[in-house]
Image (spheres, helix red, strand yellow):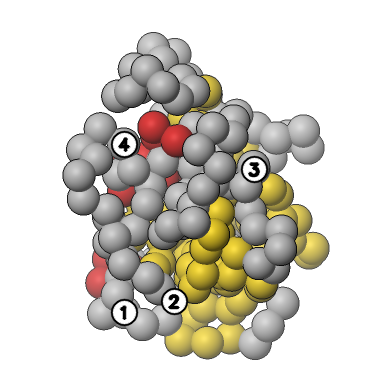
Amino acid sequence: MRGARPIVLSTFPCLVASVARAGPLDYDLFKSLRDPRPDCDRADSFAPQRVQLRDARGRWNLALLKTARAHVSSTIRGWPGRHQRAFLNDGWWNSCRSWIPARMPARAGVDLGAEYSVGAIAFGSEYQPYYHDRNPSKFTISVAGEDRVFREVVRFDDPRDPVKRRRVWELEPPVVARYVLIDLERSFRGNPRIDELEIYGDSAE
């Protein structure tokens, strides 16, 4: 992990919030997994697939908490039925439930609403590849607690192997975080698409 760096609050004014640390987690705190699968706005792409609530280690997908809020620097125009800010952590994979920025460089993040122990972060461009474009090739992932001082936990720069399908970055050891930000600097074939931002962890001890 890199050294701490201050966040630019003008980009994410929503990050000024009261101090809170989460208590024990249970299913009632998360978005419903019983909601019917939404329709895709076009027939020529894969239908949405439900995002997992817990990973193979039993960690919760904290991005699906009812308190979790997505924030982005901009959103591409002309696609009201897809590529929206709300789709960054809506619990559905695939392109028609994704987010794409209007301008680069771009930033996307999630405020979990309280501090949690975060052990892994995952995202992809397309859960089931169809368009084969908009693959992030240079970005950083940073986290912050209630102090809102961000530290870099992932640095990715590989134009020959950009992020296409879903990838997972393990954080060893886990970090205490409320805010998770992705700063996107470059992508392959168009502005980057983030299918779903997943944040895995548990209550902070």
Does label 1 or label 2 sit earlier along the sequence?
A: 1
**Label 3: which residue?**
166
Q: How far apart are the alpha carbons under marks 3 and 4?
A: 18 Å
From the image, tell me which residue sits under label 2: 148
Residue at 33% x, 23% y is 42
Earlier along the polypeptide chain: callout 1 or callout 3? 1
Where is mark 1, residue-wise?
A: 9
Q: Circle 4 sits on which residue?
A: 82
Q: Residues within 10 Å of mark 4 (few under 14, many from 20)?
A: many
Q: Would residue 198 be visible to someone looking at this image?
A: no
Left or right: 104, with 28 as reference point: left
Q: Residues within 10 Å of mark 2 (few under 14, many from 20)?
A: some
Q: How many marks?
A: 4
N-term-proximal mark, 3 vs 4? 4
Residue for point 52% across, 63% down? 187
Q: Looking at the picture, which amino acid does disc 1 mark?
A: Leu
- Which of the two discs, 4 and 1, labels the residue nearer the N terminus? 1
As drawn, which residue projects farthest toward the front? Answer: 189
**Disc 3 marks which amino acid?**
Arg
Q: Is residue 157 above or below residue 48?
A: below
Q: Position of residue 67 (x, y in %)?
A: 37, 45
Q: Quadrant of the C terminus?
A: bottom right
Mark 4 vs mark 2: give the one in front. 4
- The residue closer to the viewer here, 101 or 134, is 134
**Viewer-nearest of discs 4 and 1:** 4
Residue in front for this viewpoint, 123 or 44: 44
In terms of secondary structure, where does tag 4 sit?
Answer: loop
Residue at the image position 58 percent from the left and 86 percent from the top: 4
